[in-house]
Amino acid sequence: MTTARLLIRGGTLITLAEGQGDPPVGDVLVEGGRIVAIGAGLEAGDAEVINAASMIVMPGFVDTHRHTWQTCVRHRYADVTPDQYFGGFLPERGPRYRPEDVYIGNLLGALSAIDAGVTTILDWSQIQNTPDHTDEAIRGLRDAGIRAVFAHGIPMTEFMAWGVDSPRVHPSDIRRVRETTLSSDDALVTLAMAGRGPEMTADGIWQADLKLARELGIRSSIHMGAFPFNGEKGAISQMHAAGLLGDDLTFIHCNCCHDDEFKMMADAGVTASLGVNVEQNCIGIGDLPFDRLLAAGIEPSLSGDAETLGCSDMFTQMRQAIGYYRSWIGGGHSRAVDAPSYLGAADALRFATVRGAEANGLAKKVGTLEVGKAADIICIRATDLNLAPVSNPIAAVVHGAHPGNVDTVLVEGRVLKRAGVIVGHDLLRLREIATASQKHILADD
Ligand SMILES: [Zn+2]
């Protein structure tokens, strides 16, 4: 449903705009998918009114790395050894995916993101088994109505050949996608490259991949240094030595990267994405590098990563980030001399919104509530039993809220969740199709 004019009235406004003090009570006027006014007592005129008197109103969360195609087998590998995911699921189950499995995974994953107040995701796809798989991934995102950066990756048909010292350059079908389906950088779904970088490719290949992404005018998102054997490759140092680091790059995880490499990232404007829950849940991944990144001057974005391995919502990422930071770093265990000693709720909320927007190349469009930005807005019910009575709105969202408190979600002015319910989708049917897809993917498991 498209709403031409819409007034969100009387909410507690966490705008996350630079310099905002205590969140005021006020209105947000939306027109043509954009925020056109913020203030108290705005005239509704002919606009539809959403009564937000008992709500916290804030920008939607921005996720910078999510393997959405895996949604129909979510949590299957969250309680087993990582080998069963990397050595079992990816190489053995990935080839089984049909285009319709990718579609339903992306649709369900995007809708559940919206349900949890996430209005933008970077879909780190790596299931480009055929052009049809790619097209269905994009269709799933579009049908959900979410804002998405579709990061085009490798096929899962021959995981080892594509993922271990690979001599293969990035699948050329990305050119077709850029020239046809995702040619616009202003659309709701835009294109990026899910790159492999020096950790997964032979020398010369990652340089060619990066050249291609830059020729196509798109950003690259690359996994870096999650496990110790990844970090030992010194991939960031290699990219630095080649003079190829740049502000069009986002590095994911970075747990086992060297402090010097964080300095290289900061100098080049490279952004970071931490999949907090999965990094803590997946045995063998190094410590969260929050302290070392912050010491280098990089505020990371947050990401849900693979729901096969854990939990994707941003409330979880924020709380685990704070819990880790306060218990481990606050307990005097920091490996970085210059790391801040404390991580506050406002910091975590900024990582989950503003820094996400930057890492997805969408800082001018989303991440804060400001006049001129896209109307990607969420309303959280402050009267729910787990939040009321609210004494500090930012602390309530970060320390207390969960996806069930998200009442209303707008993306580019369209209401996608209203009164706690996803609108415009037959969820019963969706679950049936997702269950059938799961059975196909996991058959004989
Ligand atoms: Zn990942």
Image (cartoon, helix red, strand yellow):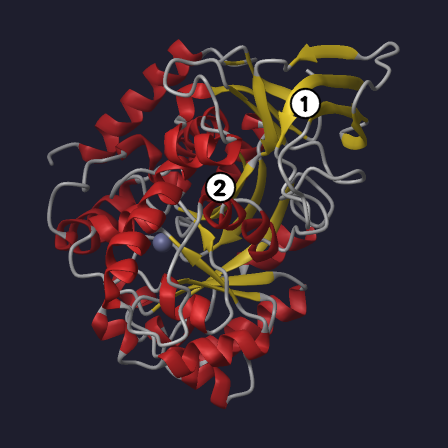
- Name the one closer to the observer, 240 or 289: 289
Q: In the drawing, what numbered circle is on residue 414?
A: 1
Q: Is residue 21 left or right of residue 160?
A: right
Q: Based on the displayed image, in which of its 4 quarters is residue 60 positioned?
A: top right
Q: Report helix, strand or loop for mark 2.
A: helix
Residue 387, placed above or below residue 127: above
**Residue type (three-letter) at the residue carrying disc 1:** Arg
Q: Which mark is nearer the camera, 2 or 1? A: 1
> What label does residue 397 carry, if any?
none
Q: CA distance from mark 2 to mark 1?
A: 28 Å
Q: Residue at x 39, y 57 (%)?
A: 342
Mark 1 crowd level (few <14, some 14–19, many ≥20, 10 Å Cα):
many
Q: Quadrant of residue 25?
A: top right
Q: Quadrant of the N terminus?
A: top right
Ligand 1 positioned in quadrant = bottom left
Q: Image check: 442 left or right of 144?
A: left
Q: Position of residue 326 (x, y in %)?
A: 30, 53
Dot 2 corresponds to which residue? Answer: 132
Is residue 33 toward the left or the right of residue 354 in the image?
Answer: right
